Image (cartoon, coloured by chain):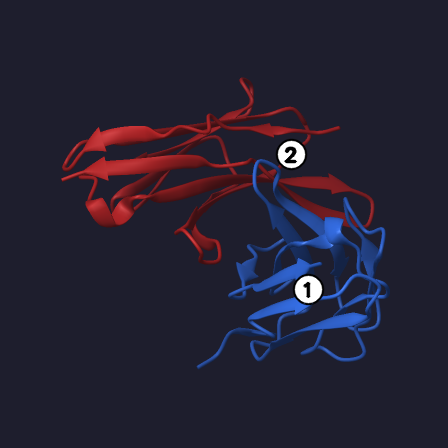
Amino acid sequence: QKEVEQNSGPLSVPEGAIASLNCTYSDRGSQSFFWYRQYSGKSPELIMFIYSNGDKEDGRFTAQLNKASQYVSLLIRDSQPSDSATYLCAVKEYGGATNKLIFGTGTLLAVQP
Amino acid sequence: IAGITQAPTSQILAAGRRMTLRCTQDMRHNAMYWYRQDLGLGLRLIHYSNTAGTTGKGEVPDGYSVSRANTDDFPLTLASAVPSQTSVYFCASSVAWDQPQHFGDGTRLSIL
């Protein structure tokens, strides 16, 4: 069973700090990596995706991918209370005609004002 | 507003009843998906469709069926509901099978 692992948290950071969320995956053949934000009682919202090793920045968000170590991380700079949510890591599993997106169980982020 | 519409928003259903969850998207996305989300287990793929006329099984397909008669609609049917199918169900779509997926607002389903 191919897996995506995340620390469930809660990860508590003060307002204005950098929040670092981590995710490891078991399938070395994975090619695409996604971060979703999910507020309580709401649907997942795509915030970042990354395909290549290295960093990808979008506003206050930076996704980092290290395929050799099989981890992907999300950094949130200048964290705001509105960033408080569960962050889901998802990894695309490739194989024949399948296109399964495997989700971690999420990390709960709490930004303290 | 373009996006994914799921119906109903929530439903309480007696065990043994048949239920169809509706999902419609107006973005002309080729691929569509159904997930269930349970506490502690995360999102799990039930069925998917890469393009109209084709469907495939996900991680937890038993007890569920889907059809994809056209690009816009991807209904999920529970033929005979059981309490273990109590969950939040999300429909998602993407431009193509290898592109980022976008989610609908979900259907909260309780089977008694």
Tell me what residue is drawn at x 28 percent, y 37 percent.
A110
Q: State the quadrant of the N terminus of chain B.
A: bottom left
x, y percent for residue A12: 27, 29
Q: Is residue A99 left or right of residue B57?
A: left
Q: Which mark is on residue B2?
A: none
Q: Which mark is on residue B31?
A: 1
Q: Secondary structure at mark 2?
A: loop
Q: Residues within 10 Å of mark 2 (few under 14, many from 20)?
A: some
Q: Which chain is red?
A: A
**Residue at mark 2 shares a chain with residue at mark 1:** no
Q: Which residue type carries mark 2? A: Ser
Q: Which color has been applied to chain B in this rendered view? A: blue
Q: State the quadrant of the C terminus of chain B.
A: bottom right
Q: Nearer the viewer, residue B78 or B3?
A: B78
Q: Quadrant of residue B19?
A: bottom right
Label 2 marks which chain's residue?
Answer: A
Asked whether residue A55 is in view, the answer is no
Which residue carries the number 2 mark?
A: A30
x, y percent for residue A10: 36, 30
x, y percent for residue A70: 56, 22
Kindly report the distance in space between the C-alpha atoms of the residues bearing marks 2 and 1. Answer: 19 Å
Depicted A48 relative to depicted A3: above or below: below
Tell me what residue is drawn at x 69 percent, y 30 percent.
A29
Q: Which residue type carries mark 1? A: Ala
Label 1 marks which chain's residue?
Answer: B
